[in-house]
Image: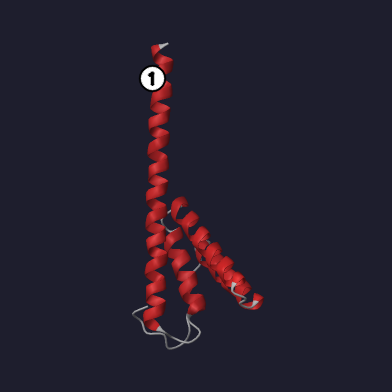
Amino acid sequence: MKLLTGLIFCSLVLGAQGLLSILDLAGQGAWDMWSTCSDMREANYTNSDKYFYARGNYDAAQRGPGGEWAARVISDARESIQRATGHGAEDSLADQAAYEWGRSGKDPNHFRPAGLPDKY
């Protein structure tokens, strides 16, 4: 009985550590998304939004499952807000393609506009 209780306790502790690790990675992924959003605003560069969306999702997804989850939730929330405010469906589809491109681990520079400063 003590062995069974010990195994259950260890499973719970290890499970909690795994959950805390994923939550930590999700927080780091959310920070990556925020940082990239800040860079996009600072750059204020025409036609660069898809690049920054792909880069933010890429950076967050590199954190692992928690970061990828955060990137998906934040990106989906952004699109929901845009739909609610009446932005075009074509732009939303292009945004979603950039999100998925970044989350899948593909190079975000695919969306990089010519002339965007190297800082970004």
Question: What residue is drawn where x is 43% and y is 61%?
Answer: 60
Of 107 and 49, nearer the camera is 49
Residue 116 coordinates in the image, percent (x, y): 41, 85
Res. 3 image quadrant: top left
Of 53 and 112, nearer the camera is 53
Instruction: Name above or below for residue 20 compared with residue 106.
Output: above
Residue 71 coordinates in the image, percent (x, y): 48, 60
Res. 67 image quadrant: bottom left
Residue found at the very far front of the displayed protein: 85
Question: What residue is drawn where x is 62% and y is 76%?
Answer: 86
Where is mark 1, residue-wise? 6
Instruction: Name above or below for residue 5 compared with residue 100.
Output: above
Say which quadrant the C terminus sits in. bottom left
Res. 100 image quadrant: bottom right
Question: What residue is drawn where x is 47% and y is 65%?
Answer: 57
Residue found at the very far top of the displayed protein: 1
Instruction: Name above or below for residue 15 compared with residue 52.
Output: above
Q: How many marks?
A: 1
Q: Is disc 1 placed on a helix, strand or loop?
A: helix
Instruction: Name above or below for residue 68 compared with residue 49.
Output: above
Of 93 and 85, nearer the camera is 85
Residue found at the very far right of the displayed protein: 89
Of 66 and 102, nearer the camera is 66
Question: What residue is drawn where x is 39% and y is 33%?
Answer: 14
